[in-house]
Structure formats: structure tokens, C-alpha cells
Image (cartoon, coloured by chain):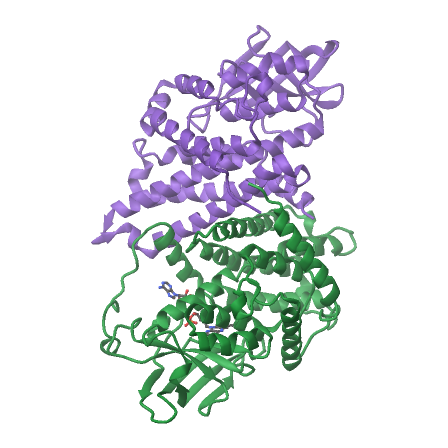
Chain colours: A green, B purple
Amino acid sequence: MDFNDTPEEAAFRAEARAWLAAHAPAHALREGERLEDAEEARRGRAWQRALYDGGFAGITLPRELGGRGGTVIEAVVFHEEESRYNIPKGPYITIGLGMALHVLAHHGSPEQKARYCEPTLKGEMTWCQLFSEPSAGSDLANLRTKAAKEEGAREGDEWVVNGQKVWSSWAHHADWGLLVARHDPSLPKHKGLSFFLVDMKTPGVETRPIRQISGASDFNETFLTDVRIPDANRLGKVGDGWACCMTVLSSERIGSGSPREAVQEMVEYIRRTGRGADGGNALDSAANRVALAQALAEERGEKYLAARLRTMISRGEDPGAMAAMIKLAYAGRNQKMLGLGMEVRGLDALAAAPDAGDTLGLHYEYIWSTVMRIAGGADEVLRNQIAERVLGMPGDWRPDKNVPFDQL
Amino acid sequence: MNFDLSDEQKMLAEQARGLLAERSPPARLRQLIGEGAELDAPLWRELGEMGFLGAAIAEAHGGLGLTALDLAVISLELGRANACLPFFSSVVLAGGALSACGSAAQQAAWLPGIASGEKIGTFAYAEGPADWRAALPATTFAATSGNEGRITGTKSPVADGGVAGFAVVLVNAGGAQAFALVDLDQPEVSRTRLDSFDQLRGHHAISFAGAKAELLAGDADTLARLLDQAAVQAAFEAVGGAQACLTMAREYALDRQIFGRSLASYQAIKHRLADIAVAIELALSNAYYAGWAAQNAPDELPAAAAAARLTALAAFKNAARENIQVHGGIGYTFEANCHFYYRRERTLALSLGGREVWADRLIAHSA
Ligand SMILES: Cc1cc2nc3c(=O)[nH]c(=O)nc-3n(C[C@H](O)[C@H](O)[C@H](O)COP(=O)(O)OP(=O)(O)OC[C@H]3O[C@@H](n4cnc5c(N)ncnc54)[C@H](O)[C@@H]3O)c2cc1C
């Protein structure tokens, strides 16, 4: 066991640090700076372009696709170093980098890779994920959006897509969408799906913002009405839709760890912040210390479990459902800890002054912490995965198994 | 970065696991409880002969000179087996104290015996319900000449106090916390066996009426370091116990049919065991880091040890309780194996500082 960088890793870290020191400060947010949606998107694209020009875009992506051809550990090292700077990256960018490139690399044709990878790496092409529907979330394969093939003469075959997607994050800013739809309802639900790349400017694609509990509208309903998609924009074979979705979702899970030590930051905040005339602070309470220490210990455990899984990945082993453990642990612990964070701030957290950035940030994060337990694999779904795939316990009762979709 | 045990460590773990599964199966534990034994003597001898007891003791003193992490893989397997052995008292604590602050003569006198298993030591710190960390111990050391003297007072409870031949005793030596090395086989020492909650780890009250003793060179800092090192080993022991509980609960649930289907097919059970599996992996990851830091990053050891201790005991607590729950009525019987762990978990949770103590240490040392 050696927790230090190998000589190669140390060399890469030094290179990344030097490059970041030269380029990152110009892109970083100033203390307390907040950006409007469109400005955040612009800044995110600019940073992505800088990364591309510096040779740090798509670190694990093969060189022939425009990536760096580096290792998983190098990607982690770069991420650690990059997160020392508060750079607005925008989820617009990360959906493309994390999901689109990942699925293109695994299932794309040479032409598709050539067309989409490089613009995505440069931040010129942004993506959204059009998976979920009103009747399909955890049970994604229950989706109803239809794709019907039309044989074409001159332009080649086309697909005509009709249906409704929901919770499509940043679809209103995205250039392209990753779409899964049902091409054959006479097959069992997982089998009749195909995967498409859809230009969001295609006639018939309409996004409507949904107002969220945070007050923002980051996600949308996306209506698809007679949307025509060239067959050349189908990813994988007809019927490969489910496999493509799984590739996208696996990237979502491995990418979900955060190097930020939020509990540690909270302890430091409390140390700085007195609690009235007696000069003490919230750490004077043993109950707070025990709760915070438990959260700190779990946060450290998540970090070191991630390190164990990365070691497995770098050896070519598949951590499988063990990756779900980090997401599950993080999501629950995060919400509990943020709730505690509001309690230790006391009445300050009840209503924050307009310039109380720390407290306003906490308000937002406590709201957002609900999402982490739902999206990217809900808690209960992850528990099932761990029980079934790590512990080898039986699957749930599934009356829909192997039944044609149109007979469900 | 390579965050995994080495191949040698994995082999060591496998060896220990195989031996313990064979020599210390649940039937043997029941037999030892029936006899009121405090030590599985033949197994202890065998572990000594195989080098396990001297794993972390210097080669010059008859040990193997391995690292804290090597010792830890053995601790984990002992936790899994719930063996009736004074490993933690003798090897981790008494051996750790001697290695850290014994004089050359003291080390030469005691460490080879610890490594072979012929000598058993323990660490006597508690004095009843009083908080042993805050104040000076009531047990006093009065110097006679040099580092020699006599101690007076009562330590209780002392783990493995019935089978130990010597003890490292936390004393008040002239107004300062100090360690005294005491041979327990002398007329000025008397022991009373207590009714230990853990039937496989005996506890005694030990009274010293002017017993001969000699000081080790340790002070309050040495004590803190020793406790950190011990917390790492205890965390591994707890992870081993938790893993045993999870395996047991899983196997029982897969076997048991309820309302026409396997108990393991119910989400109430699946999700409970999934949560335990996650808690175990977090704890093991913290324990790995602490085991590594013990050797390679001493400045980080206090926080790392405390984090390992907190997560491992949280995992073990939940695993030990839910294991009985999954078993239902059979879990409440002496013939089922759940109770060994249900008792051992409390022993680890209450020894060497409870949750609050380690929470404070983590908060104080995390930066
Ligand atoms: C902020 C946000 C952004 C999102 N962005 C996108 C996006 O960009 N693109 C996209 O396609 N989707 C997106 N999603 C959707 C997300 O993937 C789904 O919300 C998620 O898959 C859960 O589906 P659902 O909301 O339909 O809840 P449901 O699946 O209906 O779940 C409801 C509850 O049932 C539980 N449950 C589900 N299955 C089981 C089971 N087998 N056993 C026991 N309990 C179960 C769940 O854990 C949950 O508690 C986003 C969601 C949010 C909140």
C-alpha cells in the first residue's frame, strides 16, 4: 500500500499544477461572484476551450478521439488540482464530457466519433440527456417515446420520434441531446429500445422549463413531436438502446464522487464563528462534536473507498456495484450534515442577511441535497444493486420480466 | 498511488483466517465459555509458534519486524473469528507500550516472551467509572531507587487480567501520568474476576498493595500515540466482526423461507444488509488509511485513527444488532453464533475511550 504519488503521477501532478497556475486564475470566480445562466455557460465553454488547447481535455479519452489518452489516476489527479480553483464549468459541459463522450467512445461509429468528439472536447458542442419520462425514472425501460423508421429515397432512412421527456437538465441550453426511444413495442421492455443523437434545433423539439424547489429552472419538459432524425444519428445497432443507456449511467456514477471536504469546511466555519456574548462556538456542545465527527469520519471513508476503487480500475478490475456504495453513502450523509450545518448556525440559517454568502450557500445546498438521493440512481435502487450484485441476494419480484411491452 | 493490501498481506490474512476457522470455530467458543476459560491456550501457543504474536515486534526481540498494517490484517481475522485470545491486551497494548518506551533491558526482558506467547501482558488503565483520561490516576507509584518503586491502588476493569503475567499500569508518578511495568505474580497483587459482558474476554479488578514496579519512559504523549495505534487495531478487529455478522445474516436470510419465498428476497432485509455492507467498506477504507498512516504519516495518525475507530464501531454496532434481528428467535439462542459478536461489539465500543472521546480527537486533529 502506498498512498503517495508514484514518480509518474508526481510528474503529472507537477505538470498539471504548473499549467493550472498559469491558466486557471483568469477563469476562476472572484470571491462571492455569482453568474447568470447564460454567462455561466459562456464561461464554461471558454474554460473547456482552454483545457483543450492545453492538452487537458478528456484525459482518459483515447488520443485518436482528441483526448489525452491518460490514466484514470491522472484524471483524478487533474480533478483534484483543478478543484483548488473555483472555476465555473457549468453542467452543460459536464453532461457532454461525462456522458456523451463516454457513450460515443463505446458505441459510436468512426464517422460519429469524428463528428462529435472534438467539438465536445472544445466546449463548442453541449449536450443534454433525454432519458427520463413521466412514467420512466428508476424504471427507465418503461419509457414510451416512440421512434418509427421511415425508408427514405434520397436522404437515406429517417426516424420519426414522438413522445415526452422530463427532468431534462439544461436542455434549454444544449446543442444536442442523448435520446433513448422505443422502436419496437412488441419486444420486452429492455429489448425494444434504440439510442439517438438529436440536434436540439430540429423542428418538433420543444423544451419547457420546470420550476424547481430551489426556485431555479435548470430542468425541463422536452416534447418531441414528429421529430425527424437521420438514421446516421442512431448510436449502436437498432435495439442497442439499453446497453447505451447503461454506458451513460455508469459514467454518471463513477463521476459522482467529490473531492471537496465539505464537513471539514463546516468544522472550520464553526471555529471561525462565535455564538454570542459568551465567546464560545457550536463545537462547545458534545452532541455537535459527536455528530460532526461521525460525518467527518464518513466523509473520509468515502474518500478512501474511492481511492480503493480507483486502484481496482487502474489495474483493469471492474468495481461494479461497489461504485454505488460511494454515491449512496455520500448522498445520505450530505443531507444529514447540511441539516446539522443549519442547526449549528441557529437563527442565522432561519433567515440570512443578503450578504451572508456562507448561509445562502447552505440554504441552496440543503435544497440540492435532495437531488443527490434521487438522480443518478436513487437510494433505494442503489441499495437493491448492492444487495443483489455485491451480496448476491435475490432480485425483486418483477412481473414485467420478459413480457412484450405492448402486453404490460 | 496503490491503495490496497500487498500480496504478502493478503496471504498473511488468508493464513490467519484459515487457521482460526479451523481451530476456533463457534463450537470451540461455546466449549470455552462452558469451561469458564479466559484463554484458548493451545491456539495461543500455535499463533506464537507461527509468528503471528510477534508480527510487529522487532526481529532483535524474536519478532518478525513487520508493520502496523501487517498486524492489522491479523487483528481483522481475530475479530472475524471472535477468538478467545488476549491478542489486543498483550500484543497491541503491552507490546506496543514496551516497543514505544521500554528501555533496552525492559524490551529484552519482555518482548521475546510476548512474541512467543509465553508471556502475556495487559494494559491496566481504568479505575472504575472515573474518567481515566481527564485526571491523574488514583493508583500511585512511589520510587525506591532509579526507575524502580512500588505501586498502590486498584485498576478495574482490566481486560485479560486473569491470564496476564504482567501489566503496563497507568499511574500517578510524582504528579505526572506515567507507565509502570508490574509483574503480576507477586504477593502484593490480588485479582478479582469480574462478570465480564463479553464471555470470551475476561476482565478483572487488580489491586496493588505496594507491589514492585518499574517505570517505562512514557508520558502523556506516549499514551496518546499508544491509544491511536491501538484504535487502529481495534478498528480492524471491529471490521472483522462486522464482516462475520454480515456473512452470517446474509447466509441465514438466503436459507430461510418465509411466506413462500426466501427471506433474502425482501427489500426490508436487502436494504438493511446493503447499508451494513456500505458501512463496512467505509470503515475498512478508513482503517486501511490509518494503518498506512501509523507507519508512514505519523502526523496524520490521530485523525486517521479516530475516523477508523468511529466508522468501524458504527458498522460493527449495526451489524451485530441486525444480525440477531435477521435471525429471529434462533438468534437469541446460545447455539446460534450471533451472541458472540453482540457482546464483543460492546467490549470494543466501551474500551479505551467511548465514541465521544474519539469524536473529540477527530475534531481536534482535523484541519
Ligand atoms: C435535478 C434533477 C435533474 C435531473 N436531470 C435529468 C436529466 O438531465 N435527464 C434525465 O433523463 N433525467 C434526469 N433526472 C431524472 C432522474 O434520473 C430521475 O428522477 C430518477 O431516475 C428517479 O426517477 P423518478 O424521478 O421517476 O422517481 P421514481 O423512479 O418514481 O422513484 C420514486 C421513489 O421510488 C423509489 N424506488 C424506485 N424503484 C424502486 C424499487 N425497485 N424498489 C424500491 N424503491 C424504489 C425511489 O428510490 C424513489 O424513492 C433528473 C432528476 C433531478 C431531480
Q: Is residue B20 left or right of residue A32?
A: left
Question: Where does residue B252 sit, x and y in percent of width and height?
Answer: 29, 43
Q: Is residue B10 left or right of residue B295?
A: left
Looking at the picture, tell me which residue is in the foreground, A374 or B200: A374
Q: Residue at x 27, y 64 (%)?
A: A398
Q: Is residue A189 left or right of residue B210?
A: left
In which quadrant of this rendering is ligand 1 seen? bottom left
Question: Where does residue A336 sit, x and y in percent of width and height?
Answer: 55, 58
Image: B53 above or below A345? above
Question: Where does residue B201 sit, x and y in percent of width and height?
Answer: 46, 25
Q: Quadrant of residue A93?
A: bottom right
Looking at the picture, tell me which residue is in the foreground, A168 or B337: A168
Q: Residue at x 70, y 62 (%)?
A: A19
Q: Quadrant of residue B251?
A: top left
Looking at the picture, tell me which residue is in the foreground, A187 or A50: A50
Question: Where does residue A355 sit, x and y in percent of width and height?
Answer: 75, 71
Extreme residue toward the left, this view: B260
Q: Is residue A387 left or right of residue A84?
A: left
Q: Residue at x 39, y 38 (%)?
A: B244
Looking at the picture, tell me which residue is in the foreground, B44 or A336: B44
Image: B356 above or below B48? below
The answer, for residue A169, to whether it is visible in the render is no
